[in-house]
Image (cartoon, helix red, strand yellow):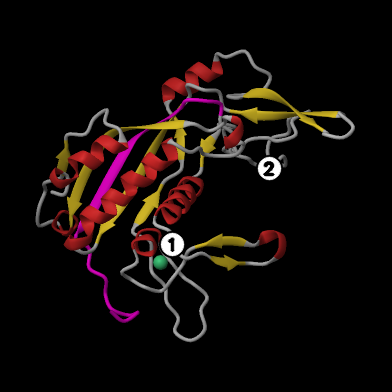
């Protein structure tokens, strides 16, 4: 397919649910937003409301990097020095990673841009969690402070610092939109999405995962399919699948029945 070929749309799968924090979680922000004295490592917050959220880009990046490792994809280095990152990006439109997450590698010669088939929205606190966190007695809104002690192995000098994090139990609403383009790819792509969520559950989001931060669970509420005909107005039906309360691994088992 040439770069300018029109890409067909079969329809969109919209998967919504909750991200449940099983341990305190910190997704780092900058300390320039809301001024809070004494915090070394503030979390990311909505600048208007002060509420913490999980950026869609963080979630999508984590999904991608864990899948790249699982599938042993070739990694290239992008950027240089301190900003160098290693990730997989190629110009093969049949590559399972690049067609799902997008790719625009800066290669010599032919310019290729594979648009992502998934959109991962920012995940915001659920109303219940917002209320629960508002009634919590802490020094910072919607969050807790955790003291961490860095110990110098030679001098035994301790350098305590405070980490801000969202406490365990908090729940965020997530939404993933997958645009189906070819029927033959749908099952593989959905399987990869659920596998990525499954991998995150056994990994972490945010920082300090090796110290126990950022363990999460995904609870699916709803999965619907809107066909191309739905958008053109030729059909009113939205397919809805029976997935309420399911985990990503349970959805994988149901996959052959989830394509519509
Ligand atoms: Zn690729």
For label 2, the residue is 30
Tell me whether the residue at label 1 lies in contact with that at label 2, contact meaning CB atoms closer than 8 angstroms: no
Q: Is 9 colored magenta in this rendering?
A: yes
The tag earlier along the polypeptide, 1 or 2, is 2
- Camera-nearest residue between 111 and 5: 111
For label 1, the residue is 73
User: From what the image shows, is residue 256 above or below residue 111?
Assistant: above
Quadrant of residue 50 within the rendered picture? top right
As measured in the structure, the alpha-carbon distance from the residue carrying label 1 to the one carrying label 2 is 32 Å
- Kindly give the residue lying farthest to the bottom in the view shown: 109
Q: Is 173 colored magenta in this rendering?
A: no
Residue 35 percent coordinates (x, y):
73, 33
**Label 1 neighbour load within 10 Å: few <14, some 14-19, many 20+:** some
Confirm if mark 1 falls within 8 A of ligand 1.
yes
Q: Residue at image x 13%, y 49%?
A: 260
Q: Which residues are magenta?
A: 1-24
Residue 143 percent coordinates (x, y):
60, 24
> In the rendered view, does 166 fall on the left or right side of 248?
right
């Amino acid at each position: 397919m040439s770069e300018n070929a029109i890409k067909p749309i079969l329809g969109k799968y919209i998967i919504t649910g909750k991200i449940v924090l099983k341990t305190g979680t910190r997704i780092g922000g900058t300390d320039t937003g809301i001024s809070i004295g004494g915090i070394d490592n503030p979390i990311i917050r909505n600048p208007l409301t002060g509420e913490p959220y999980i950026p869609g880009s963080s979630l999508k990046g984590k999904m991608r990097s864990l899948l790249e490792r699982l599938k042993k994809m070739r990694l290239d280095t992008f950027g240089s020095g301190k900003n160098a990152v290693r990730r997989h990006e190629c110009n093969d439109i049949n590559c399972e990673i690049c067609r799902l997450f997008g790719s625009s590698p800066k290669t010599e010669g032919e310019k290729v841009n594979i648009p992502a088939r998934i959109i991962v929205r920012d995940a915001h606190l659920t109303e219940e969690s917002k209320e629960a966190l508002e009634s919590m007695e802490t020094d910072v809104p919607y969050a807790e402070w955790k003291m961490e002690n860095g110990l110098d192995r030679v001098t035994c000098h301790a350098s305590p610092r405070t980490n801000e994090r969202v406490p365990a139990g908090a729940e965020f609403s997530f939404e993933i939109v997958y645009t189906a383009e070819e029927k033959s790819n749908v099952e593989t792509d959905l399987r990869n999405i659920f596998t990525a969520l499954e991998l995150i559950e056994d990994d972490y989001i945010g920082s300090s995962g090796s110290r126990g931060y950022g363990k999460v669970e995904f609870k699916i509420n709803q999965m619907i399919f809107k066909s191309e005909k739905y958008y053109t107005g030729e059909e009113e039906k939205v397919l809805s699948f029976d997935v309420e309360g399911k985990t990503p691994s349970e959805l994988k088992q149901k996959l052959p029945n989830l394509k519509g």
